[in-house]
Image (spheres, rainbow, N blue to C red):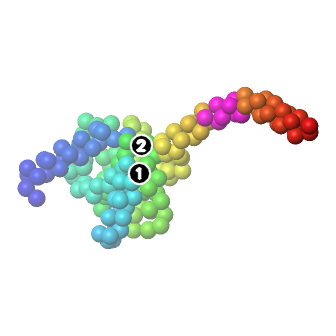
Amino acid sequence: MDRSRKEELVAELHQTFEDTNLVVITQQTGLTVQEVTMLRSQLRGEGASFHVTKNRLAKIALKGTKFEPLEDSFTGPTAIAVSEDPVAAAKVAVEFANKNEKLTIVGGALGEKVLGVDDVKALAKLPSLDELRGKIVGLLQAPAGKIVGVLNAPAGQLARVFSAYGSSE
C-alpha cells in the first residue's frame, strides 16, 4: 500500500473516531469473508459499522481523539465496531462473538470512558436508543388513552341506560 493511500485511510479512520460515541475493539482470527459480511450487515442494520484495521494506522488515527487511551488495545488481528448509538455496536458484536468463537471482544470505549470486556458485555444487555424511545412513547401514550376511556365511559353508560329504557317499553 502506498503512502498516500495510508494517509487517506488514517484520515478516514480518524474521522470515524471523531464522529462516533462507541468503539468496540475485537480480535478476529479465522473469520471467513461470508462471516465478516454477515457481521457487517447486522451492524449496518443497527446503524453501526465494522472496520478491519491495521494496528499501526489505527494508533495513528486515534491521536487527538477521545479514544486515544485505547491505543494499547490494538494488538493482533484487530477490527473495530463503531456506532453513534451508545449500545448498538456492543449489542451486535457481543451477540456475534457469543455465537462465533472466531471473534473475541477485547474492550472498547464509550465517549472518554474506557471499557473492559465485562463492561462491553454489560452495555450490550441494555436496550438500544430506539427501544428506549419506543418505551417512552408508550408510557406517554398510556395515560392519554386512559383519560379518553374515562371520559367516554359516562357517555357509554348513558347510551346503555337509554337503550335499556327504550327496549323495556
Residue beneath the point at 47% across and 50% down: 120
Query: Left or right of 16: which side holds 150?
Result: right
| Residue placed under numbered mark 1 in the picture | 46
Query: Residue 28 got which mark?
Result: none
Q: Amino acid at mark 2?
A: Asp
Q: Quadrant of the C terminus?
A: top right
Residue beneath the point at 39% across and 58% down: 42
Q: Secondary structure at mark 1?
A: loop
Q: Quadrant of the N terminus?
A: bottom left
For the residues labelled 2 and 1, the Cα–Cα distance comes to 9 Å
Q: First in sequence: mark 2 or mark 1?
A: 1
Residue 37 visible? The answer is yes
The magenta region covers 141-149
Circle 2 residues within 10 Å: few <14, some 14–19, many ≥20: some
Q: Position of residue 81 (x, y in %)?
A: 35, 52
Q: Nearer the viewer, residue 43 or 52?
A: 43
- The reply to whether discs 2 and 1 touch (Cβ–Cβ < 8 Å) is yes
Q: Secondary structure at mark 2?
A: loop
Q: Is residue 126 above or below residue 136?
A: below
Residue beneath the point at 51% across and 39% down: 133
Q: Position of residue 106 (x, y in %)?
A: 40, 55
| Residue placed under numbered mark 2 in the picture | 85
